[in-house]
Amino acid sequence: MEGEKFERVLITTWGNPFGWKETAYYISGLKDEVKTRSTLPVLVAAYNPDLVIIIALDTLVNYIGCKDNINNCSEIWPYPDEDGRFEDVGSYEKVIENVENRIWRYVEELCNESTTKAPGYVRDALREFLDTGKIKTIVAPGIGDFKAKVTKATSQQSIEVRVTVENGHATDYYHFIMAKLAELLPSTNLEIILDLTHGLNFMPVLTYRAVRELSTIGAYFGRVKLTVVNAEPYPKAGGALQIHVIEDSEILPSPMYFKVNNQRWDAFISALANGFPLAFAKFFPSKDQIFGKIRDILESYEDTTKVETENGTENRRVIISRGLELDERLSGLALLYYAVKRAKDSPELNGITLPKEELTIDEIDKIARIFEKIPAIGERVRYEVKKLRNLNNKSGPTWEPRSKLDTGWNPHNRICQNNNDKNCIKPRNFIAHSGLEMNVVELKLGNNTLFVRYPPSKENIVVDLCNLALSRKFGGECR
């Protein structure tokens, strides 16, 4: 829509930047070809994002860099201490710190006139991002066994440098970056530029998956655009490497069926996936509590990751041994956290304090609008809300059930004089009526406004019904 504001985020995956060669890049929108060792300065100048997120691997720790002008690798990373030894990384916390520092220094080199041939306006744009804290790094779990042999030019001494990961799983990377991206991504209308040029092995496909899934759940509460870019392969026979746009799309919300092993939080996830506006408000979780669970899992993962180092004359080695495997609970919590974060800041839900037990018909209507981008669900929710609104509109003083509404909370089925079994709440009916099935909902009038709630006595039943819907179980048994 015209006039809508978007925050633009550039996400880029980096394999081993310390081996990249300087080359010329070209992208539509920039007047010059840019000679540099990374797409980062080019994309920052071309897109002018509000935030940059660099994703690197912990397997970059300590090695592949050199001192004393060692041939065939970067001259700047890592700096050994005064005795010429490589940095002590005897804990996983030190590993993360080491890689973060190396990435920062590498970005610094991309800004300096003495170390890059990029035009001044390109270097200055990147420098501004660096100086103003608009660049964030994620150091994610890697896998594999990496080895390189380097030779000091001064002494011709060869040193074998090696990083080994034991008990690693490629999917740890996916679950980990889901949690980190959910924390870093803004909760506004969002335009994501995803650069997959430099990612190593599994990084591009798992990063794309994570970004796509977070975008899908974020799109319930605002607009999300995704642009994926990738440069031509290096080396090229001649000319600059063009950075191509390989996807340019607007992401729409889509039901996502996942669990986090907490029944009330799973009830909220079900409400979002299936279009239950009243359950959405009632079971709306605490963002801080979700973040606390994410933090606990990540802290356990890092605490149980052990690091051994060997610092010999001819061999330098770091062995990273994982003690835990990350799983779907972490990525599910990340999706849940991002949904709650986006909902809290959503203009569509402005004025509704969540969670909330008792909602006016106008508040129900507001929540129902978040499902409009999914026609199959949105139409059903709109129909159920319309029925309640019609009930509100005809509840004048001459309407017979008015006296029941005026006396306080009454079951919806009693007000409408429904003759069906009032104690029977079937899962398929609960789903078909968007969680507003008359056997489980109570109504009352206050200031000529219709209020809706689940009765406290049936709260556990509603939790059960939501969880059955999340499990895609539509049996006809009464609850």
Image (cartoon, rainbow, N blue to C red):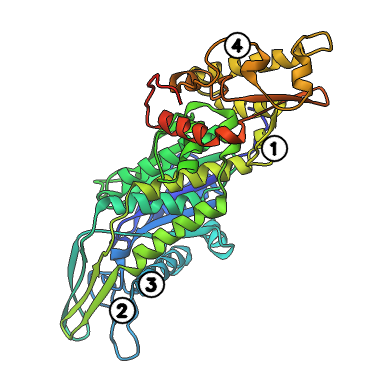
Q: Nearer the viewer, residue 293 or 331?
A: 293
What amino acid is found at the position of numbered circle 4 in the picture? Asn
Asked which quadrant contains residue 366, the reply is top right
Between the residue at mark 3 and the residue at mark 2, the CA separation in whole angstroms equals 9 Å
Between the residue at mark 1 and the residue at mark 3, the CA separation in whole angstroms equals 41 Å
What amino acid is found at the position of numbered circle 1 in the picture? Ile
Asked which quadrant contains residue 121, the reply is bottom right
Q: Nearer the viewer, residue 302 or 48?
A: 302
Residue 367 spot, x, y in % from top left:
62, 30
Q: Nearer the viewer, residue 361 or 90?
A: 361
**Which of the two marks, 2 or 1, is nearer to us in this view?**
1
Nearer the N terminus, badge 2 or badge 1? 2
Which numbered marker is on residue 352? 1
Nearer the N terminus, badge 4 or badge 3? 3
Label 2 sits on residue: 90
Label 4 sits on residue: 418
Q: Quadrant of the N terminus?
A: top right
Cβ–Cβ below 8 Å for labels 1 and 4? no
Residue 404 spot, x, y in % from top left:
75, 19
**Which of the two marks, 4 or 3, is nearer to us in this view?**
4
Label 3 sits on residue: 93
Between the residue at mark 1 and the residue at mark 4, the CA separation in whole angstroms equals 31 Å
Q: Secondary structure at mark 3?
A: helix
Categorize mark 2 by other alpha carbons within 10 Å: few (<14), some (14-19), many (20+).
some
Nearer the N terminus, badge 1 or badge 4? 1
Cβ–Cβ below 8 Å for labels 2 and 1? no
Q: Is 306 on the left or on the right of 443, as rendered?
A: left
Nearer the N terminus, badge 2 or badge 4? 2
